[in-house]
Image (cartoon, helix red, strand yellow):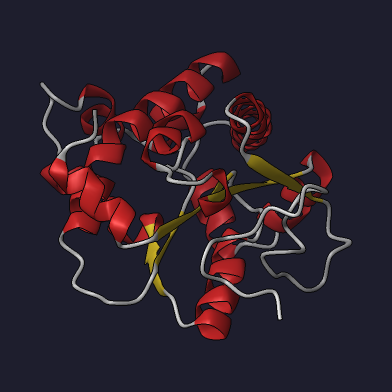
Amino acid sequence: RLSMNEDLILTQQVLWLGGAPCSGKSSVARQLAEQYDLTVYHCDDAYGDHTERCNSSDHPTMYAIARMTWDDIWMHPVDVLVARELAFYREEFDFILDDLRAFATAKPILVEGCALLPALVAPLLTLPQQAIWVVPTPMFQRMHYARRPFIQDILAQCSNPAQAWDNWMQRDEQFAVHVAANATAHDLAVTWVDGRRTTFSPLSFSPPSSRKFPGVSST
């Protein structure tokens, strides 16, 4: 059974935009916020605060990763990297919910980020239409990651930049597949982004069943 605080989150009409890195989630969130007057919560913006507040007992993965070097993060087998990423997001989700409970806004809240694993979000939904996951194809992901200037700064700090890059990309490719499969298993909407879409709306991200975000008009 949901707690009173979680019931409050539902009554505030929270919308969830999850997915994998480099799929355009932040850009979509900004467009939807402007078009439909939503308050946006970007999970990435809260990352620093969450890692500062975590502790080794309750959040062992978060605590460890926040103190790793880039070699510690990227120079491991890909299956280890994927498992660690999933564990990190599972530990972080309670921090995200606490942040949302503290929001004081009459507007619907659009929560955006990779930390929104479908299995964690699904129990909070009144309707499946409140959530969608956006994942990039491998080609789209690698193309757009390569354009981000901070990537090279990180790789330069790794003992084997080429291997770190490949591990990083493979991790995120496998994470995307996991997220898509998990969302589908919960009968939640998934859209794969391959670069051919140039405009985004709730409907353009909806599967053929025409799922929409509640409270967002298609007109």
Q: Residue at x 68, y 53 (%)?
A: 211
Name the side, left or right, on which 29 lies relative to 199.
left
Q: Residue at x 57, y 60 (%)?
A: 213
From this viewpoint, is residue 18 visible?
yes
Q: Nearer the viewer, residue 46 or 73?
A: 46
Name the side, left or right, on which 13 lies relative to 147.
left
Quarter of the view holding residue 204: bottom right
Q: Residue 109's spot in the image, x, y percent?
A: 38, 66
| Image quarter (top left, top right, bottom left or bottom right) of the N terminus | top left
Quarter of the view holding residue 66: top left
In the rendered image of this protein, does residue 199 appear above or below residue 149? below
Q: Residue 134's spot in the image, x, y percent?
A: 65, 49
In the rendered image of this protein, does residue 110 appear above or below residue 156? below
Quarter of the view holding residue 172: top right
Q: Nearer the viewer, residue 42 or 101?
A: 101
| Residue at far right of view | 196
From this viewpoint, is residue 66 visible?
no
